[in-house]
């Protein structure tokens, strides 16, 4: 842990039980460890004016990582560009900052879509199933030599086979 205060750097290990308070900047080179006993749920708390605004927590029960924010959670990459947003209603936006539904996708290049891959289909751009929209049309694209079925009430109603043949009420 490196603690900087008015230009003076002090290097060492900070071991403290209870509460430790710092004002100003605290810089850690390589790693900060938040530890608890053998059981427990250690967390990193972010407060503003004494009010908790967000935290990052390892939850011992269930072995999971919890991220909580009073507002939105964003994931950024590249030149600090927002890529994913989870708003306070639980809506997820990819490529957009104002998602309107549980999953909302946007591509400024007018070619947005989702791929679905399996072990059998492979994971390349020409494998699996793609659902999307571009500047010309909306599409469902099956790259595999398999049928594409549309169903209601758990029954296939329209099936397009691998050679392009169409069958209706195939359930």
Image (cartoon, rainbow, N blue to C red):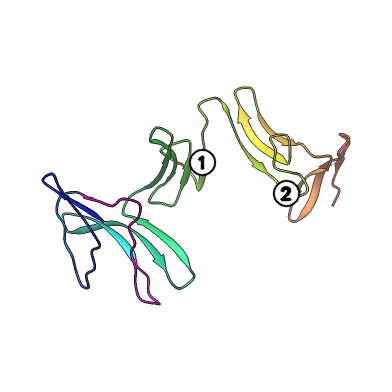
Please tell me which residue lies in front, 32 or 46. 32
Q: Residues within 10 Å of mark 1 (few under 14, many from 20)?
A: some
Please tell me which residue lies in front, 51 or 6. 6
Mark 1 → mark 2, Cα distance in angstroms: 23 Å
Vertical placement of 76 versus 14: above or below?
above
Secondary structure mostly seen in magenta is loop
Spot occupied by residue 79 in the image (x, y as percentages of width and height): 39, 32
Q: Nearer the viewer, mark 1 or mark 2?
A: 2
Which residue corresponds to mark 2?
Answer: 118
- Residue positioned 28% across, 60% down in the render: 45
Would residue 20 be found to the left or right of residue 105 on screen?
A: left
Describe the element under mark 2 as helix, strand or loop.
loop
- Residue positioned 49% across, 70% down in the render: 62
Q: Is residue 41 magenta?
A: yes
Describe the element under mark 1 as helix, strand or loop.
strand
Spot occupied by residue 49 in the image (x, y as percentages of width and height): 16, 54
Q: Residues within 10 Å of mark 2 (few under 14, many from 20)?
A: few
- Residue positioned 40% across, 65% down in the render: 58
The answer to which image quadrant residue 7 occupies is top left
Q: Is residue 167 magenta?
A: no
Spot occupied by residue 66 in the image (x, y as percentages of width and height): 41, 61
Task: Point out the tag, 1 or 2, that comes first from the N-terminus.
Answer: 1
Q: Do the residues labelled 1 and 2 touch (CB within 8 Å)?
A: no
Vertical placement of 117 versus 125: above or below?
below
The span shown in magenta is 26-42
Residue located farthest toward the left when viewing the structure as drawn: 6
Please tell me which residue lies in front, 108 or 67. 67
Spot occupied by residue 122 in the image (x, y as percentages of width and height): 74, 44
Which residue corresponds to mark 1?
Answer: 104
Can you say which quadrant of the picture contains the N terminus? bottom left
Would residue 106 be found to the left or right of residue 36 on screen?
A: right
């Amino acid at each position: 842990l490196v603690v900087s205060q008015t230009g003076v750097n002090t290097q060492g290990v900070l071991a403290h039980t209870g509460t430790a308070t710092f004002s100003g900047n605290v810089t850690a080179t390589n790693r900060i460890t938040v530890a608890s006993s053998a059981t427990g749920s250690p967390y990193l708390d972010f407060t503003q004016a004494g009010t908790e605004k967000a935290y990052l927590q390892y939850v011992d029960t269930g072995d999971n990582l919890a991220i909580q924010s009073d507002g939105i959670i964003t994931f950024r990459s590249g030149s600090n560009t927002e890529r994913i947003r989870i708003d306070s209603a639980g809506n997820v936006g990819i490529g957009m900052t104002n998602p309107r539904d549980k999953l909302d996708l946007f591509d400024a290049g007018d070619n947005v879509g989702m791929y679905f891959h399996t072990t059998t289909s492979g994971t390349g751009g020409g494998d699996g199933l793609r659902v999307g929209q571009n500047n010309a049309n909306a599409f469902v694209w099956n790259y595999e030599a398999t049928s594409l079925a549309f169903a209601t009430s758990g029954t296939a109603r329209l099936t397009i086979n691998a050679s392009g043949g169409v069958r209706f009420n195939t359930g």
